[in-house]
Amino acid sequence: MVAALLFDDTFDHGERERFDQLMEMLKQKRPDYYAPSGIKFISMEINNALVEGRAESLSVLVHELAEVGESDIDRFNRTLSQLAYHGRPYLLLDARRTAWPKVRDSRNVVVWGIDEFAGRGIYTELFEWLEGHPYADERDVEDTQLRERILFYSGVDREDLGDAIARRKCG
């Protein structure tokens, strides 16, 4: 694929930003070519932004990725893992929330993949909530904000949520 060759070539020559500029031109001038492979291109641009330390462009790119995430759920999940690894977990919330309605209703994602995505979304919400509530325990499952965040993905019963909060203390 031409984009992969361009990516490798710009990497070899230390011109990562040039790759991003070329992808932007492609998106503007040939959306018909860009769109079917958009998730690949955006993933490459996110990789470049992480390596180059361009945090300002990450949120825009991650939002773009989330809009097309269901078209290649494996690549989407790998890119989210890359963001978490590189210390950008705050970007995961928006990405998962944006992608969820499309993933939930997708014909491109197998049923167990949809369930797994929902589970990861729930844990992302839970971990984010726990960051702001470091002394929470299983009695805090009645927190309205937490319940709303979790129920966005699916119905989770009170006991399961309490167990998840309690397990965090053991780990």
Image: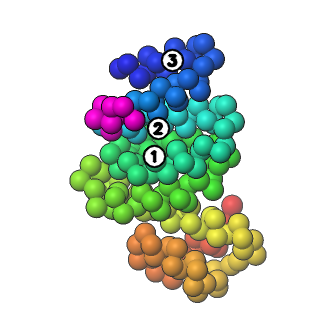
Q: Amino acid at mark 2?
A: Ile
- Tell me the residue that label 1 is attached to: 65
- Asked whether, in this view, residue 21 is left or right of residue 127, the answer is left
Residue 161 % position (x, y): 54, 76
The magenta segment is: 28-35
- The answer to whether residue 1 is magenta is no
Whether pointer 1 and pointer 2 mark residues with C-beta atoms closer than 8 Å, the reply is: yes
Q: Earlier in the sequence, mark 1 or mark 2?
A: 2
Camera sees residue 53: yes
Q: CA distance from mark 1 to mark 3?
A: 21 Å
When the figure is inspected, residue 125 is found, relative to residue 29, above or below; the finding is below
Q: Nearer the viewer, residue 49 or 86?
A: 49
Q: Give the quadrant of the C terminus.
A: bottom right
Q: Predominant secondary structure in magenta?
A: helix
Q: Which residue sits at x=45%, y=59%?
A: 98
Mark linked to residue 42: 2
Other-residue count near label 2 (Cα within 10 Å), few / some / many at <14 / 14–19 / ≥20: many
Residue 58 placement: quadrant: top right
Give me the residue at 49% from left, 21% from top. Answer: 7
Q: Which residue is mark 3?
A: 8
SS category of the residue bearing label 2: helix
Instruction: Give the residue at the far front of this rendering.
Output: 29
Q: Judge whether 35 appears above or below 22 on screen.
A: below
Residue 4: x %, y % from top left? 43, 21
Rendered view: 68 above or below 22 = below
User: x%, y% of residue 160?
Assistant: 51, 76
Please give the label number shown on residue 55: none
Residue type pointed to by label 3: Asp
Give whichever of discs 1 and 3 has the lower sequence position: 3
